[in-house]
Every structure is written in structure tokens, then in C-alpha cells.
Image (cartoon, rainbow, N blue to C red):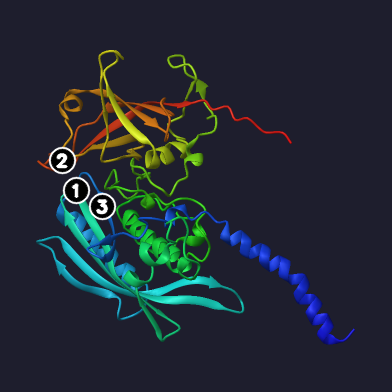
Amino acid sequence: MNKFTILFLTLLLALPVAMKAESAKEKRDDTRYLTGAVPEVDGKVVFSKEFQIPGMSQAQIYDTIMKWMQERLKENKNIESRVVFSDEAKGTVAGIGEEWIVFSSSALSLDRTLINYQITVTCKPGNCLVELEKIRFTYRETEKYKAEEWITDKYALNKAKTKLVRGLAKWRRKTVDFADDIFMDVAVAFGAPDTRPKAEKKKKEEEKTTPSIVAAAGPIVIGGTDKKTDIKVTTAEPANTVPAATLTPATPVGKASSDMPGYVEIDLKQIPGEVYALMGSGKLVISIGKDEFNMTNMTANAGGALGYQSGKAVAYCTLSPDQSYDAIEKADNYTLKLYAPNQTTPSAVIECKKLPSQTTPQAGQPRTYVGEIVKLLMKKIIRLQQWK
């Protein structure tokens, strides 16, 4: 058997393995990268995220953002990455960045692109808006692309909007991940925990294994200014990043509730991750009153979050400017009910004692209420195993 025959047989045997690997890649869940994953404003790609930081003044938020942006852009060790504009009175900071996005890396090859972008942050009392735009790619030194003609729904999705176009898929995935990484950095700068897997905090060369808190739609509420405080952050608006299947909590560990049959009371020092996931993709309803036939119920349209302040578990709920807030203003206690998608009974029930507000509500702005969690109940779920 000559060497050419041996080479041919080796390639033939390796082909099924390669095809299997390629098939596995094709079966990946790209739900979070489909329609709307790359937002456009007036035909331009603009990733944006609003952060609500109750209790912080515009000056405090501005100082935090300025320090973060200078350090974040300096990490690139590139003179082209720097703060280019700042206006403390208006609360505006803008910078330009240039860094690498790695598609794949091995001992024999490195597939990556240089990304250029502009980041602008607008600070106001209690909140800030982060915008990532003017994204450009330089690939193999000579190939140059604009985000608008490379990763938008028009070019990167098939006609049915159900799949990523093969040649552009890696660009869209990694750019969305890059934006999420920037937003996570901002959240961490304000004291939120870093929920990224350790190996992916800066170099995301592998696919994400857990959803980021910043991937959900709507504003992010960060519940405190003490960066030593362990604060969990998420939103309470629907998001495509967390499949509905992951929101069905397993039977939690705790003692059975005598007040609500079928529910288990949870240790407030060990709040399960499923509750945070529900905050990110479920429906948050505020119930005021004890008589179920005479109580006020409202949805927290602008989101919610869980966290810890001074060692105590707290819950945040935010009403949009158009919602009535009289009932919750007058209440000393209320209950938050978290509903998983397509469910009619709450998967989690959180009893709260309202805490005094640290800021004066402003007309036309969302109102955030903070409550000390008195009791947390989770619904029991019985999982059935299918025997083969």
C-alpha cells in the first residue's frame, strides 16, 4: 500500500468526524442572535442599554463612567482607543475604541477581526444610557466592512428570519456578544456582580454557557452604590436570550409553606438562580392588600431586580411613567409575584416590606420601589423522567 493510498484512507476516515463536528455547529441554538439582536436606529446599527442606579446623583454617575471608560479603553494598549469628548455639566462622555474580536483560535490558526466603534454615555440623576455605534470591521488587514452592511437582519438572516446566514453568522454572534460584554463592564463598574463565566470575562473565544444579565430587554436596575455589596441584577421584561424551558425551576430546597400549599419557603441567603432567571424573562406583578377579592394588582412594566443591601435581601420593582403609583405609595407591605412565560400561577412569590425612598421621584420618569424581602416562596415542580 503506497503512501497516497494511506493518505486517501486517512482522509476518508476523518471525513465523518468532520461532518459530525460541522453538524453539531449547525444545531447550536442561535435564538438570541435572530431578529432584533442587532438593533437599528434610522438605518444605523446602535446597541444601547439603560442603567437605573437609584440613589446616585448625576455627578456620581458621571465620575464612575469617566473612570470606567478611561480604564476600559486603555486596556487595548492602543492610542486610537481613548475618551474623545466629555461634558460634565451635561453628563456626556464619548470614546472611540479599536480592539480584536476572536472568532476561533488554535495552535495552528487564529481567526479574528479588528473592530472599531464609538461609545457614548449620557448620565442623569439615577440613570445613564450607554450607546455603542459606528461599528466597523477590518479583516485580514485589507477587507473592510460596516456593521450596517454586514450584520443587520437584512444581510445576516435568511429570508424567513429563522437562521443566520452561514458566512456572516460568526460576525453577528461575536458582535452581539461584544456589545453584551461592554454593557456587563458598565454594570460591574456600578457594583453589580460579574455573571460571565471566568474564562469569558474578557476573551470570549468559546460560546456562552449562561445568559448575561445585560442580554435581557429593558433597563437594568442596579440597587445600590456600595460596590462591596453583593447585588444581583436583572430585568423583568421578556427576552429571547433565556429559553422558556430553563425558566421552569426544579423543586427547590426548603420547608413546605403552611400558608400556600404547593410552595416551599426559601432561605433568603441562598436565593436560587431560577428566581433571577424569572426576573429576566418572566412577568412581574405587584399585589397590594391581603384580601384576594379586594386587592390592587399591577405589572411592573419597567422591570425589577433582586439584590442585597446591608446584608438583607431586597427586591426592586419599577413602574413606567404612565402607570398609577398611588396604591404602592400608600402601602407599607406588598407582594411580588413572578410568572414564567405562558403560566397562570406564580412560580415565585416574594413578600416585601417597603423601604424609604432615597431619591425624590421626578415627573415623567420611572419610579423604583425597594422592599426588604420578608419571605420568598417557590412553587414545587415534579419532574417526570421518560424511561426508554
Q: Residue at point 90% right, 83% down?
A: 1
In the rendered image, the quadrant that contains the C terminus is top right
Q: Is residue 139 above or below residue 373?
A: below
Outermost residue, front side? 159
Q: Tell me where residue 351 appears, x and y as whole percent.
A: 34, 25
The local secondary structure at tag 2 comes to loop
Q: Residue at point 49% right, 71% down?
A: 167
Q: Tell me where residue 70 appears, x and y as whole percent.
A: 27, 69
Can residue 152 be seen here? The reply is no
Residue assigned mark 1: 126
Residue toward you, 189 or 272:
272
The local secondary structure at tag 1 comes to loop
Residue toward you, 275 or 227:
275
Residue assigned mark 2: 359
Viewer-nearest of labels 1 and 3?
Answer: 3
Q: Earlier in the sequence, mark 2 or mark 3?
A: 3
The local secondary structure at tag 3 comes to strand
Quote the CA–CA distance across marks 2 and 1.
8 Å
Quote the CA–CA distance across marks 1 and 3.
11 Å
Neighbour class for label 1 at 10 Å: few (<14), some, many (≥20)?
Answer: some
Quote the CA–CA distance across marks 2 and 3.
18 Å
Tag 2–tag 1 contact (CB < 8 Å): yes
- Name the amino acid type tagged 1: Gly
Report the side of 323 relative to 80 (left or right): left
Q: Tell me where residue 7 appears, x and y as whole percent.
A: 79, 81
Report the side of 4 relative to 346 (left or right): right
Residue assigned mark 3: 50
